[in-house]
Amino acid sequence: MILYPAEWTKLKEAVFTALAETDGGGRRLWTIPWSLHNHPETDSRVALCLSRAKRQPQGLGRIAKSLLIRLQYNGARRLFARHPGAVAVAWNGLGGSRQAFLLAARDAGLGTLACELAPFPGRITVDPRGVNAESSVMGQDFSSTPADNDWRAMGETLTARPSRRADVGQSTAALPDTPFLFCPLQVPNDSQVTLFPGWTGGMDGFLAALAQAATKLPNGWHLRLKEHPSARTALPLAPLLATGRVVLDNQSDSFAQLQASRGVVTLNSSMGLQAFFHDKPVITLGRAFFARQGLVEVAGDQVQLNHLFATPQTLTFDPTQRARFMTWLDRHYYPRLTDASALTEKLRQARKIGPPAP
């Protein structure tokens, strides 16, 4: 059986229900159970989960949040001890209560599955290790995967997401003919930015790195930015725009800008991966499961980033390596929610792999 905390969105519930039906049973937990009984790992797990919680309370709120995570970790650990052979499932699981839930299962010797939307339409992430830069894609050997083009079908229905802000749109207006690199900005407090920013340290460091690198672009080139449609507030972009080499275009369609560009620059946005469908070179600065030399240009520090911006016409990638990687994602990693056999295999992998090292 699978054990999972209740979720209040139809999509998440659909994923958990499909897994439970595939497994022959599941138990939905309306609340993560509580317990006062500590375990040897409790203190370290609480500190980790609290440090990675998306919302970081202060003062009394932080004390209360810490106590809640402690009670939840202990309660979940007690629950899992009574259900050997079960698989614990949670959405995302990168911090806070959901991470405590999954860590409790791993510490009790159970397998886990972290779920999330895939960056491709109609697909989901169901991973026994975690999501994003903590997923089982990291270190995966796909060199023996066939290098065909069937994977391109996953990108046929990709569209830019609707915006939450009046000043960020998806217009189809014409774009300039001058060469440019495109940087689709991410939500500043998204876990991809806060947990996996690499050497940039976060959104502020990422923007500062871009500001310096943009001055190295050849004459006639510019860096084109677009803020994320889901970002609730505008980013402090004045230093970037002051370089005279950067353009902010919040109105043009995101994929139209990507397609018209000579390359994509990103911390670790899924649009960097989606750029593969348009055969665009990609520069990554942060930790991403697709940040491998050959798939993208990995900028490991400011010096490397400056060099890549100074020579944008030489940006490249290995088409065969990309085809193998994308084929592996298509055939083995991102199942369809309606594919019962693929979901069964994910559960089998979770039980086989068992509790991964934290």
Image (spheres, grey):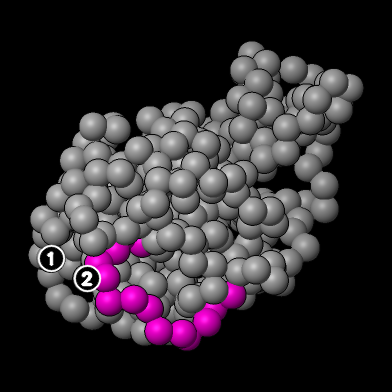
Question: Where's residue 215, x and y in %?
Answer: 30, 44
Task: Please say if 131 is above or below 121.
Answer: above
Of tags 1 and 2, the one toward the viewer is 2
Query: On the picture, is 5 further left or further right than 258?
Result: right
Picture quarter containing residue 15?
bottom right
**92 up-or-down from 36: above or below:** below
From the image, tell me which residue sits under label 1.
319
Q: Position of residue 124 (x, y in %)?
A: 49, 66
- Whether tag 1 and tag 2 are in contact, CB under 8 A, the answer is yes
Query: Mainly helix, strand or loop, the magenta region?
Result: loop
Please state the extent of the stretch shown in magenta in the rendering.
Answer: 169-183
Q: In this view, does 209 lie above or below 234?
A: above
Residue 12 magenta-highlighted: no
- Of mark 1 and mark 2, the one earlier in the sequence is 2
- Furthest toward the right, the residue is 60
Q: List the residue tagged with mark 2.
A: 279
Q: Is mark 2 on a helix, strand or loop?
A: loop
Mark 2: which amino acid? Answer: Asp
Assess disc 2: are there few (<14), some (14-19) or many (≥20) residues with their C-alpha within 10 Å of its C-alpha.
some
The residue depicted at 40 percent of the width and 84 percent of the height is 174
170 magenta-colored? yes
User: How far apart, in angstroms, are the residues tagged by discs 1 and 2?
Assistant: 8 Å
Viewer can see residue 324: no
